[in-house]
Image: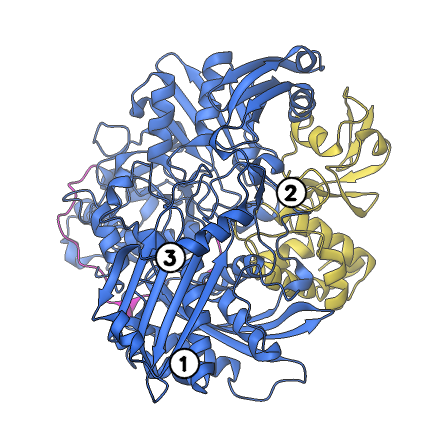
Chain colours: A blue, B yellow
Amino acid sequence: MSRPQPSRRDFLARTTAAGTGLVIGFHLPGGSGSRGRVGGHGAAAAAATREAALNAFLRIAPDDTVTVLIKHSEMGQGVSTSLPMAVAEELECDWRTVRFEHAPADPAYAHTLFGSQMTGGSTSTWESFDQLRTAGATARAMLVAAAAARWGVAAAECRAQDGVVACGERRARFGELAQEAAGLPVPAAVPLKDPKDWRLLGRATHRLDSPAKITGQAEFGMDVRRPGMLVALVARSPYFGGTLRRFRADRAKAVPGVVDVIRIPSGVAVLAQDFWAARLGRDALETEWDAGSVAGHSTAAQVEEYRKTAQTAGAVAAALGDVDAALAASAQRLEAVYAVPYLAHAAMEPLNCTAELRPGACEIWTGTQFQTHDQAAAAAIAGLQPQQVTVHTTFLGGGFGRRANPASDFVSEAVHLAKASGRPVKVIWTREDDTQGGYYRPLWVSRLRAGLDASGRPAAWAHTIVGQSILAGTPFAAMIQGGIDATSVEGAADSPYLKSIPDHRVDLHSPELPVPVLWWRSVGHSHTAFAVESFVDELAHAAGKDPVALRRELLPADARVRHALDGAAEAFGWGRPLPPGHAAGIAVHESFGSAVAQAAEVSLENGRIRVHRVACAIDCGPVVNPDGVEAQMQSGIVFGLAAALHGEITLREGKVEQSNFHDYPLLRMFEMPRVEVRIVASQQAMGGVGEPGTPPIAPAVANAVFALTGTRLRSLPLRLT
Amino acid sequence: MKLLVNGKEHEVTVPADMPLLWVLRDVLGLTGTKYGCGMAQCGACTVHLDGRALRSCVLPVSAAAGRRITTIEGLDPNGDHPVQRAWAELDVVQCGYCQPGQIMAAAALLSETARPSDADIDAALSANLCRCGTYQRIRAAVHRAAGMTGPGGRP
């Protein structure tokens, strides 16, 4: 499948395991390669229910229940519905018989482009779309072949629909045929349905995970219980990279319920019968730390340092023409510097992992986005081979990138403690641990300069970005080429505006700091969209042009950003009068293969920014579940609004200043704008929807605040005083 | 100490100041009630005490003894409370971690205010955080649940 966005395509190309291509996982997990059985943790269940595994992605039970194994983690984005939809469309089963189960960690479930089993980059649905449809189509062909063999007729005379194979008057349910079908050869090539014949794909479909989640039955990592299990809380350094000088465990061990105190690489763990005893024990633990290189560090000084750095040229990420000459020759020149802070992911479920070791085996239960990495990390600590580690992926109480950590931090802690204690251990991070534990969205500064020609059209564009590389120091560091971490400049180096600005340059400084950083929903786009879309708005006002009109002037009419822009402007009623004291702002941004535009209506209430409504339009290509796309747009907007209005992690004297939701506020119900989502009809390639809703909202609101007050806010969170 | 949870009596031996949340989760194994912040900031731990919504993460278990405790597992024997039905019909959930708390808060609101306004919903549910941003659908689902009427307010 061709990708629409150059940087994304390049990024994917660089991360693709050589020759992976589109792999259909017809070898079954467990290593035997034989069909008719399943390995991993599904084996017992499958045997008990006499389910037949037709391939790595689906099993069929005698009662016709179809269990789809989802290789991507359900963290709210809806893959436990969209992925089974892709299978079911081709399988021709009855949708009401479809269930899902998280797949075990196994090469069969590797990401077709990234090469490891993981969930991220808003790729889940499109990267596996052909693979899962093929899995469904192939299984259907095998069921049909089984029926044809049973009846002694040609397969071409049989037809599968709604979970039944029929030939003339003869009928057989999938559940009756599954065992026979599983023993048949796998057909080499089965054609997929023409999209016009889709009966499920493209239709609003209820979530399969709803019933468990509304009754309290859904199992998150936090809910895992094992016989003999201890709960552990870890006292970690209050300084990133700090080292333990000494600790005293007497008082902690005296707390009733505390079983042990164990030192591990990340700190000192208190193991207890339950969370509360562990918490009291950790409170009683005495630790002293050496701060290390982060001593005295403050983010206030860091921003000032970054601003200075932004005055100098960095490694070139994109360049065309002679931007300096073009700037000098411009009729009008503008310059602005934007800044965004460190941000915590703040998923509602604090980080946790349960680990259990037996001779020659390790099991972990956790909500992870990074099965392959976590499996390898657990194996290394346990002294096992990766395939000896069983990964049970639970529901994730939010991920947003934090549960895709190359350092496998929370998983490693659990395995260390299970190994040291000889008991199953569940490590729980408190909210304070989660907020102060690092792996933040990096703090970024962007300096933008532009020159307008006599007609007010941008003719020169220079963008200097300063911020830490997410990939540096990780197993993905090899992807940094020419000093450019593509995730630092995505949305800036490949901005669609650059196509119509002949002389431009985007460059990057990647300072190294001891504050751990990580991908945070929409990654680099979370800062580049704010800088680029705010600055384009500044250019429009400087040229005396309407912000939508200038964008239309610069963006090609056939570009998906343009379709999204027009959709949002129309849905919003751009240009129509607003109530007194209200104003509008708009932004459009392409990310993860989709383009999203958002127009926001704001006012001030007691000096605070109030967002009343947001009109959002997305061009994501073919739509699997429109209801899910709408939900992800609402979700991305709320996530981005929390950052626009509230989010900020700061360091002072080397320590994180925030700790919990009272000082790291998220958006609340009373702040929720009315959101209208329009899905643009599109013939473009399928894009992602989990992240693209986040980038445009901060600049849309900032632009609306400027329209309302004449004050240009260039730092997040947006503050008028 | 005797606890009455979801209509069933339990005898527990725990410290008097242990928060109800951890007694429910770690002692009684009722894990539907969630830990999110430990300081009554997020509402993930919302349960009913004598029918009223309350944050179990800061309530000493001794304060709940002898009172009627209802958790998400006991809201409706079939998981079919009007709020749960509305949640399913409108596909409110995303990651789902906060939803037991949201549902318990919404159910308590509806038991006191049969036809809540948007302002009532803001007042009752702004104490419950949702990082996935399901607020718009929560609001719609509360209105829908309020419209499900029948004997005793049940559909």
Q: Is residue A43 above or below residue A528?
A: above
Q: Is residue A193 magenta?
A: yes
Q: Residues within 10 Å of mark 1 (few under 14, many from 20)?
A: many
- The picture places residue A11, in percent across and down from the top left corner, at 26, 52
Identify the residue at horizontal 32%, vertical 47% (top origin).
A174
Q: Which of A80 and A410 is in front in this view?
A: A410
**Which chain is home to disc 1?**
A
Q: Which is closer to the viewer, label 3 or label 1? A: 3
- Mark 3 → mark 2, Cα distance in angstroms: 30 Å
Q: Mark 2 points at which residue?
A: A660
Q: Quadrant of residue A463?
A: bottom left
Mark 3 / mark 2, whichever is N-terminal: 3
- The picture places residue A325, in percent across and down from the top left corner, at 25, 74
What's the magenta bit mostly, secondary-structure-wise?
loop
Q: Mark 3 points at which residue?
A: A465
Q: In this view, does A315 lie above or below A29?
A: below
Task: Please tell me whether mark 3 sits on a helix, a strand or a loop.
Answer: strand
Mark 3 / mark 1, whichever is N-terminal: 3
User: Which mark identifies residue A566?
Assistant: 1
Q: Does the magenta stretch include residue B1?
A: no
Give the residues drawn in magenta, as a range.
A183-207
